[in-house]
Amino acid sequence: MNNFSIGPSKWEKLAEGRVIWKTALHKCAESFEKRLRDDMKDKRDKRKLRKLSQSNTC
């Protein structure tokens, strides 16, 4: 729930309707996975920049 940014009250309300709950869950999962991929890409880019700057200062 925390990774999907859904609070307990909203979670309970969504769970009342199965179709709405499934739709919300899929959208939240997609959003979480996109954030995760973006964070991983940023970290990878920072590592690459660090390596480039270290190798150029010989």
Image (cartoon, rainbow, N blue to C red):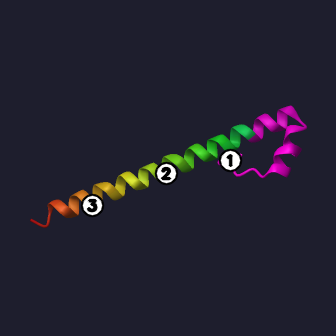
Q: Amino acid at mark 3?
A: Arg
Residue named by callout 1: 4
Q: Earlier in the sequence, mark 3 or mark 1?
A: 1
Alpha-carbon distance for marks 3 and 1? 32 Å
Element type where label 2 sits in the image? helix
Q: CA distance from mark 1 to mark 2?
A: 15 Å
What x and y, as percent, mark residue 19? 84, 33
Please identify the dominant SS of the magenta region: helix
Q: Nearer the viewer, residue 26 or 6?
A: 6
The residue sitting at 71% across, 45% down in the picture is 1
- How many other residues sit within 10 Å of disc 3, few (<14), some (14-19) or many (≥20)? few
Task: Give the number of the mark in front: 2 or 3.
Answer: 3
Which residue is found at the position 68% from the left and 50% from the top?
2
Q: Position of residue 45 (x, y in %)?
A: 35, 55
If you read the primary sequence from the N terminus, does the residue marked by circle 1 or circle 2 appear first? 1
Quarter occupied by residue 30? top right
Boundaries of the magenta span: 1-24
In this figure, which residue is indicated by the disc labeled 3?
Answer: 50
Front one among 13 and 22: 13
11 relative to 18, above or below: below
The mark nearer the N terminus, 2 or 3, is: 2
Horizontal side of residue 28 vs 53, given as left or right:
right
Q: Secondary structure at mark 3?
A: helix
Residue drawn at point x = 75 percent, y = 50 percent: 6
Q: Which mark is residue 38?
A: 2
